[in-house]
Structures are given as C-alpha cells and as structure tokens.
Amino acid sequence: MAATTTLLVGVSGASGMPLALHLLRHCRALPGLSVQLIVSRGAEAVLRAEGGTCLGELHALADAVFDPDDMAAPPASGSWPHDGMIIAPCSMNTLGALAAGLTANLLQRAAGVCLKERRPLVLVTRESPLSRIHLRNMLALQEAGAVIMPFSPGFYLQPHSLDDMLAHFCGRIFDQLRIDHPLGRWGCAPCPQPPTHKEQP
C-alpha cells in the first residue's frame, strides 16, 4: 500500500449497517489509510431502523465527512484525487441510479465520477432474491468497470461469530482495492478484530 491511500466510502440506504461500521473500523486500523465518508439520507434512515449503530459512530471513524446533499463537495469532481471508492452497503436504488447514469446525491455523483475517471469502484450489494432488473443493472455496471460484490461471507476460516464473518468480508473488499490487510485468507489464521472506537465526548 502506498504511504497514503485515500479511500472514499459511501453508505447507502440498504440493510447491513453493521458491515459499514466494521468496514470503517478496519479502515481506521490500517496504517496510511485516509477515509473520506458519504452517508446518504436513506442510510441515515436505515441506521435508525436497524439500531445498534448511530450516525456519529460512522462519522467518528472517518477523516472527513461530506454532506450527501452537497453536490459541490470535492468528490463530485473528477479532479479531486483519491484511490478508489466502496459503497457498502449498496442499495438497489443506488445501483439502479448508477446503471442509468443518474446522480441524485453526492454519493451517486462520486460513484459516477469513479466510473468516468476509471477509478476503482466496489459495490457491496444487499438484496435477495434478485430480479432481472437488478441483474441487468449489475451487469451494466460491471461492464462499465465497477466490481459487483454481493455480501456473501465465506466459512473456510471457520468463523465463530458475526464479527468474524464481517472481518473476513472486509478483507475481501480490501483485496479488490489492493490494500494490504491482516484480516485472514485461505490457509491463514482467523481474522483478528479491530479495537472498538468510542466517540469522544
């Protein structure tokens, strides 16, 4: 990994907020990684519905946070340098907007910029079962250069908890962006857990 890697993380309004929290915690634990965060309004609603994680916890784990309604923020421009973007979880609404070239908020605009600038874009989709429309949208985005990565945890590291499965999957996400990590691989030891991050009063 380079001395400083700037990673843009988007959280959209799909079920799976524990994944977003664990991803940000593991990002924070990696040296030389700067995390820039966009949480959509839909994601804020899902955070409230799922409970257990608050918006402040996500914000506290990022180096910078951008308002999802600010279409003039740096990630809206292709001239703003960064090393790739992850949307986790990625809702079918966000997926469909990206496949159609629509940009209703900063998260969608930033992802569209990644596609046009040929920067890495990983979409951790959350839906089941998938309709033909969902599959067509996924194919369109994969052909445009995105990595479509449904949340599909592996079991070969013999996870003992949901945290273990989430840690392993976060490592798989990092692999797509060529980011070194200690989160376990085939034939390796189980995934270590990052330290919990408590928001400062």
Image (cartoon, grey):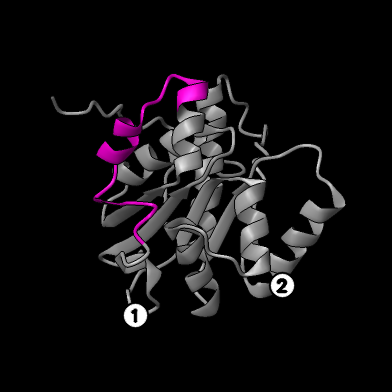
Kind of residue sitting beneath label 2:
Glu
- Circle 2 — which element? helix
Find disc 2 in the rendering and name its residue. 143
Q: Residue furthest right?
A: 132
- Front in this rendered view, residue 97 or 189: 97
Q: What x and y, as percent, mark residue 63?
A: 24, 50
Q: CA distance from mark 2 to mark 1?
A: 23 Å
Q: Earlier in the sequence, mark 2 or mark 1?
A: 1
Q: Quadrant of the N terminus?
A: bottom left
Q: Quadrant of the C terminus?
A: top left
Q: Which mark is residue 98?
A: none
- Front in this rendered view, residue 18 or 65: 65
Magenta run includes residue 57: yes
- Circle 1 — which element? loop
User: Is 155 on the left or on the right of 16, as rendered?
Assistant: right
Q: Residue at x 66, y 37 (%)?
A: 154
User: Mark 2 or mark 1, which is nearer to you?
Assistant: 1
Q: Residue at x 64, y 49 (%)?
A: 93
Magenta run includes residue 118: no
- Front in this rendered view, residue 64 or 178: 64
Q: Residue at x 59, y 33 (%)?
A: 15
**Which residues fall within the magenta stretch?**
48-70
Find disc 1 in the rendering and name its residue. 79
Q: Residue at x 46, y 57 (%)?
A: 105
User: Is 18 on the left or on the right of 137, as rendered?
Assistant: left
* Label 2, residues with CA under 10 Å away: few <14, some 14-19, many ≥20: few
Residue 148 seen in render = no
